[in-house]
Image: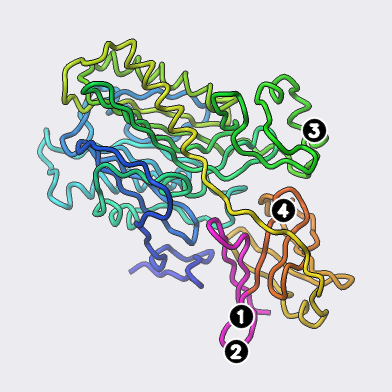
Amino acid sequence: MKETSSFGGIPSKTGGQDDLQIDTNVHGPVLEFDWPAIQIAIGSYEEGPTGLTIFRFPHRAIGAVDVRGGAAATANTDTVRSGFEVDAIVFAGGSAYGEEAITAIQTGLKDDGIRSGAWNDVALVAGAIIYDFQAHRLSEIYPDKRLARAALHTLRPGLFPLGAQGAGRMAMQGGFFGWPVHSGQGGAFRQVGNSKIAAFTVINAVGAITDREGNVVKHHRSPGQAGKIKISELLAHLPESRGERWTRSSVTSKCGQNTTISLLVTNQKLTCTELQRLAAQVHTSMARGIQPFATQDDGDTLFAFSTAEISADVVFSDLSAIAGETMWDAILASVPEEPAFNSSVSSAGVSPGELGTYQGSYRFGPNALLKIMVSSGKLMLDPGGVEFFDLVPHRPVTLESISATEFYIQSLYQTRIAFERDSSGKITQAVINPGRWQQRGIRESD
């Protein structure tokens, strides 16, 4: 029996993930569409947070794959390229470790009796992962076999969760310009006559999501730079537009930790050659909605599949163009809403004695130990070697009080931290950015 060790749901340096809570529920907006040939499920470990998304074809489907990014991480793409019918596509967080979730769906289909060991009945599942560790979150939890198996049993047709859900649970975009922001997964659906087109994507891009008017959809900018920003303005002023002086931010560009993974599905019968061309054309079109796209630091991968339910109802040239527009809709639908944060500092302040009770080391992950201390009557946070939003490695920052137990950093992202007590009144935990993307750390013994 494998020995595990965990504290408060956060695995220790030697622990496993068996104590983590599985969440397969929907927690946000959804895309609804009528298409029984596609079943979808999501799962997440909120302690990460990180997750996965399953696209299941009950009657299998044939497809193609197009890889554009310089840092792709995929599974079973050669199976797709060889023209075999596939049971499912799986997207997951957790970097290369998340590939366990892809193969877990494959073995799950056999264990559930849906597929067997017969030569023409072996389960075939392909997929891709995104990097969502450092600079995204502080833990190193990843979607594993246990989470994948639970999600597999919650499949349903016609409902795709949007935003920070599933594989997009802790996705980011915009790091190329020095202000990475939360992203997620997006979906869109169009029907022309009897032809159906569905586009799904997880945006974890180096580049920034751009709307059809050329505006950056979401960004963090310093005061005085409010309002819409044209992507053309940023690209025209490279390399200055990536620098600290341009953004007036202490945050530098965070590349090397990104990927956009996408799936396009149509019900029209298409040959493998046509599917490959469809994949290439739609993937190319995505450079309009994410700029820059397919960089050396991205792992951009797109799967294009046909459920082959109807003969050609829309000519291929039109189908391809419509699919590109549908994917742009999906890109825009990936952006999650974030509640406004009131950063007004508490006028009452916090007594020195109270501040002293927060001092200590808080473990957020195996390689994330944050230290809280008091200096000159102010609460300070030392991130050690951690890089996370406003936290720069080995650069202590001052925490301003919002209330007696809540503080924030006066900087670009206004990173918040709240302290929690146990029933005896002792401080036991700290929560960074309480809310949808919170990270929970356990106070280590003195």
Compared with residue 362, is residue 328 higher up or lower down, i.e. above or below? above
Q: Position of residue 238 (x, y in %)?
A: 74, 23
Nearest the eye: 58 or 327: 327
Q: How crowded is the residue under tag 4: few (<14 C-alpha within 10 Å), some, or many (20+)?
A: many
- What is the three-letter code of the residue carrying label 1? Arg
- What is the three-letter code of the residue carrying label 3? Trp
Range of residues picked out in magenta: 420-446
Marks 3 and 4, how far apart at CA: 20 Å
- What is the three-letter code of the residue carrying label 4? Leu
Q: Pointer 1: what residue? A: 421
Q: Residue at x 13, y 42 (%)?
A: 117
Say whether disc 1 or disc 4 marks the residue closer to the N-terminus. 4
Q: Pointer 2: what residue? A: 424
Query: Could you say which disc has been placed on residue 391 in the image?
Result: 4
Quick check: is 441 in the magenta stretch?
yes
Q: Residue at x 48, y 56 (%)?
A: 141
Q: Pointer 3: what residue? A: 246
